[in-house]
Amino acid sequence: MKFTKMHGAGNDYVYVNGFEETIDNPEELAVRVSDRHFGIGSDGLILILPSDRADVRMRIFNADGSEAEMCGNGVRCVAKFVYERGLVRKERLIIETGAGLLPVELFPDAGGRVDRVRVGMGEPRLTRGEIPMAGPADERAVDIPFEVAGRTLRATCVSMGNPHCVIYVDDVDAFPVAELGPQIERHPLFPQRTNVEFVQVLSQGEVRQRTWERGAGETLACGTGAAAVTVAGVLTGRSGRRIVNHLAGGDLVLEWLEAGPVLMTGPATEVFSGEFPL
Ligand SMILES: N[C@@H](CCC[C@H](N)C(=O)O)C(=O)O
C-alpha cells in the first residue's frame, strides 16, 4: 500500500489515496500503521476517498482503530494532498466528513505548494444530547463540576461533530494530562468517550492547549479541539471570538463567527511517502 505521512501542527496521520488503493479493514490497519515502534508511527489513519456529494471524502481512524467523525488537522492535510496531486485542483473545495460537508480554502504559493489552509468547521453543537453526554438532553454543560480521581474539575462540553470536554487550568505545562486524560476520556458522563482539552488562558485573544485525544492519547494538536476551545471561551466569557491557540506542535487561528460556524486556519505539512505491506 502506498501512503503519505502528513501532519498539521504536529498532529500526524498516515494518509492513503483511496482513489488508487482499496483498504478492506481500515480499523485494523490504523492500529498497525500508527504503532510508533512496529509501524509507521502516527496518531491514526486517514483515507482520502471519492465522494458523490463533495469534491472529496475523508474517513479518520484513531490509533486504537476507532473511527471518528472528523479531524480538523486532517482535513487541512487532505485538502493539500488532493490539490498538490491534481486530484482536485481547486482553491475552494468541499470535503465530506462524518461531521458533514465542510468548505475549505487553500492558499497556494506561486509554485502551487500549499502550506496553509482555512476550514469552515461547521456550527458547534452545545446540548448534552448532541455531544453526547449524560444528563438532561436539551441542557448545555458550561463550567459544570464533576469528579475524577478524587478531584473536582469543571468542564465545558462542545461537539464539533465529535465530542470535546474543555477544562481550564492555571498552568497547562504542570497539569497531569497523562494521568487524568484517560480517566476523563472514559468517564461515565461520556457514553461515546470524549476528547479532552486542557486550556490555559493567556489573554482574551490567546490560549495554550494540551490535548488528550479519544483513541490516540496525548497529541501535539487537535483542530476540532481547538475549535471547541474557541466556543468554550466565548460561552464561559474567558476569551473572545477570535483567538490564536498555541498547541504543543504549533499555532492555529480560530474564529467563531456570529452567524454560527467556526473557522480554523493552520498549517498542513507533508513529511514523507512510502510503501507499507498489507
Ligand atoms: N486530531 C483530530 C481529531 C481526531 C479524532 C478524535 N481523536 C476523535 O476520536 O474524535 C483533530 O485535529 O480534530
Image (cartoon, grey):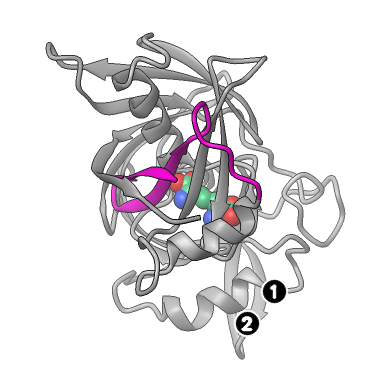
Residue wearing tag 1 = 187
Q: Nearer the viewer, residue 257 or 85?
A: 85
Q: Residue at x 55, y 57 (%)?
A: 29
User: To which quarter of the image does residue 209 belong?
Assistant: bottom left
Give above or below for 120 relative to 68: above
Q: Amino acid at mark 1?
A: His
Disc 2 residue: CB within 8 Å of ligand 1: no
Q: Amino acid at mark 2?
A: Val
Q: Secondary structure at mark 2?
A: strand
Percent across and percent down for residue 204 are 33, 44
Give above or below for 242 relative to 275: above
Magenta-drawn stretch contains 153: no
Q: Residue at x 49, y 50 (%)?
A: 45
Percent across and percent down for residue 157 are 63, 54
Percent across and percent down for residue 264 are 40, 32
Q: Which mark is residue 148?
A: 2
Percent across and percent down for residue 262 are 50, 30
User: To which quarter of the image does residue 200 belong?
Assistant: bottom left
Q: Residue at x 43, y 75 (%)?
A: 177
Neighbourhood count class around disc 1 (C-alpha, 10 Å): few under 14, some 14–19, many 20 upward: some
Q: Is residue 90 left or right of residue 188?
A: left
Q: Nearer the viewer, residue 191 or 166?
A: 191
Q: Secondary structure at mark 1?
A: loop
Q: Residue at x 29, y 47 (%)?
A: 9
Q: Earlier in the sequence, mark 1 or mark 2?
A: 2
Name of the residue lying farthest toward the bottom: 150
Give above or below for 186 relative to 122: below
Residue range (magenta): 1-24
The residues bearing labels 1 and 2 have C-alpha atoms spaced at a distance of: 8 Å
